[in-house]
Amino acid sequence: MIQLHSLNILNGNCTLMKIFLADAIFSDDVILRDHGIVFDKTILEISSHEDLRARFGESCHSLGEGSLIIPGLVNAHVHLEFSANRSTLTYGEFMPWLSSVIASRNDLINECDDDCISAAIHTMLCNGITAFGAVSSYGFDLNPCAAASQKVVYFNELIGSDPAMADALYADFQERLFASQEIEREGFYPSIAIHSPYSAHRILIQKALKYAREKELRVTAHLLESTAEREWLDDNSGAFRPFFENFLKQTQAANTSEEFLSYFNEIPTLFTHAVQTKDAELSILSEANHTIIHCPISNRLLGNGVLDVSRLNEKNIRFVCGTDGLSSNYALDLFEEMKIALFIHPHENLLNLAQQLWKSVTADAAEALRLNCGKIIPTFDADFLVMRIEYPINEQLPIHLITQPHTIESVYIQGEKAK
């Protein structure tokens, strides 16, 4: 039994506690059969049905046969401003996709108003996502994110490789960041995103990261997503060269990969993709305790290859999963993301990988985003899903949850049922 740590006395009265009894609780690689939870805004206690019924009697609510409680899912990386995309953009290779984004950017952004973004956020909620990291390029998703039921780590993105435009670009970034910092609601965390090593000048990066250190803000960045980026950073060659020459009149990359990574010393950062990383870069990531965000569907649709999770495990680098945005995905669904990941890493032990994937969308993702959720244990926020499954629960539950049909019956965030 995990003991009740508090009755949460408020104004002389006990706050309303709820007690749910489930067939099983699955959290952080542990399966507890015939257990229940006591919660208000946080998890207060976990214990057996027998013990909870003996102490709380009719206050216990049985969830019934096939019921399962798991932590709410955490989507570490999503772009919401392009949520109007369905079939506009070109898939298969990175550079044709990027060209189609540039050509269609204004139309896609104009087509996605607050209602469009709110619908994408609600879709994530229905898919069991109770917290997410939103990378915002323009600030157009600020109001829907502020109004979301979920916890939101709101990453204001900094981009710009032209030093002549540094002051104007930084001023625009600051305006968006300051606007997000004016939002006052529990569970909303203004943060900073550096777009990538090829698209952000060191002057901008260093200024933004200095501010992040001072204010203890969360930080994320894209890193070595494509072979085009790899060739450009290494040799100022490849498919990015004509792109930068034509659009920005640049013939040299803004940073090398190692220069870029050096800017993030003492700031544990979430680096997205990292498909094209080399051993030296992985060693830097490992030594600095950075996290990699794995977006398998996006990587496949854009032709960028497969993240080598074996190398990450060898170097003790944590990875978490994210959906990316609907500009490079067909769904905002971490169950689907885990399923694809389970099949594109055929050399990994299946059960071990499934367990790792579950942690990548719960405990590990929450820890990387500095959120008090992702586990069903006392003192953690009561962010959880009530699911219904139609198969026996055994030690291979992590695999079955990814591959078998399931129903999410209800979503709870800080102890309140989300609508």
Image: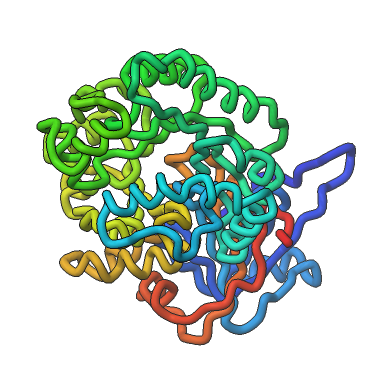
Residue 232: quarter of image: top left
Give left or right: position of 335 versus 124. left
**Rendered location of residue 259, percent (x, y):** 21, 22
Q: Which image quadrant: the C terminus? A: bottom right
Depth order, front residue of 159/70 = 159
- Residue for point 55% across, 57% down: 84
Toward the viewer: 288 or 106? 106
Residue drawn 16% across the image and 47% down it: 314
Depth check, front residue: 105 or 368: 105
Above or below — where is 400 with respect to 327? below
> Is residue 215 shown left or right of residue 41?
left
Looking at the image, what colour scheme do you see?
A: rainbow
Does 239 appear above or below 183?
Answer: below
Vertical position of residue 157 compared to residue 208: above or below: below
Where does residue 418 sit, x and y in percent of width and height? 71, 59
Q: Which quadrant holds the N terminus?
A: bottom right
Count of numbered labels shown in the rendering: 0
From this viewpoint, is residue 10 visible?
yes
